[in-house]
Amino acid sequence: MRAIIIGIISTILPSVFAQNAMFIPFGQSVEQVSEYLYSRDYAQKVDKTLNTEWVNSVSSSQSVVYYFDDDVLYSIEDTRFYKDRKEAERIVKTCLDFMTMEKNRVRVLDSENGINHYAVVTEDRLVELIVENGKKNEGANLRLKSTSRLYGPRMKTEDVVMKVVQ
């Protein structure tokens, strides 16, 4: 039964939010990421004005940010706006269910002023879900961020990891 549930979640969640074609392996160089984006026809929407972060404006309700340190990809953040609060709540529940698979412990880091910050640590990454609810059912902004524990500013990442694992 667990295998069936994992199979269902792993096929639904990627298309809904998390590990879609915008999420690519960490540790790649700027050139490799650029080649990948061009091969998928995503490059025309990417703002590369900053060397440390590239913003891919996928649509009016979605953007993906690629973070680099020393020209190596170490973090990806997918931000989506949902007009329908109920749909956003369904996506949040799905993301949290996915984050708790394999006995991962999801921690609530902050919950104030309509912002909920969830995080989970795995062996090689830190995954954060930040939910910003609009006022009076005006929708919700969801940010799913995956950060490598092997690449990038490791001390900064491990500071957040320590908050999660305590």
Image: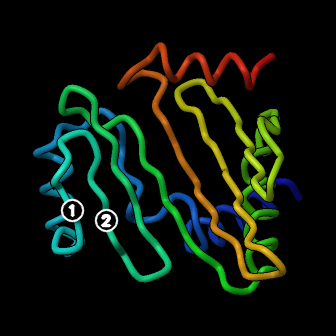
N-term mark: 1 or 2: 1
Quadrant including the N terminus: bottom right
Front residue of this view, candidates 4 and 42: 42
Badge 2 amino acid: Asn
Q: Quadrant of residue 136?
A: bottom right
The residue pinned by badge 1 equals 47
Residue 25 image-quadrant placement? top left
Q: Please rate how many residues cluster around mark 2, counting C-alpha atoms within 10 Å: few if below 14, some from 14 to 19, many from 20.
A: many
Whole-percent x, y for residue 155 in the image: 48, 13
Q: CA distance from mark 1 to mark 2?
A: 6 Å
Residue located beneath label 2 in the image: 56
Residue appearing at x 67%, y 50% in the figure = 129
Considering only vertical position in the picture, is 62 above or below 160? Answer: below
Residue 93 located left or right of residue 70: right
Q: Are marks 1 and 2 in contact (CB under 8 Å)?
A: yes
> Vertical placement of 135 versus 127: above or below?
below
Marking on residue 32: none
**Is 123 placed left or right of 134 in the picture?**
left
Amino acid marked by disc 1? Asp
The secondary structure type at the circle numbered 1 is: strand
Residue at (24, 38) in percent of width and height: 28
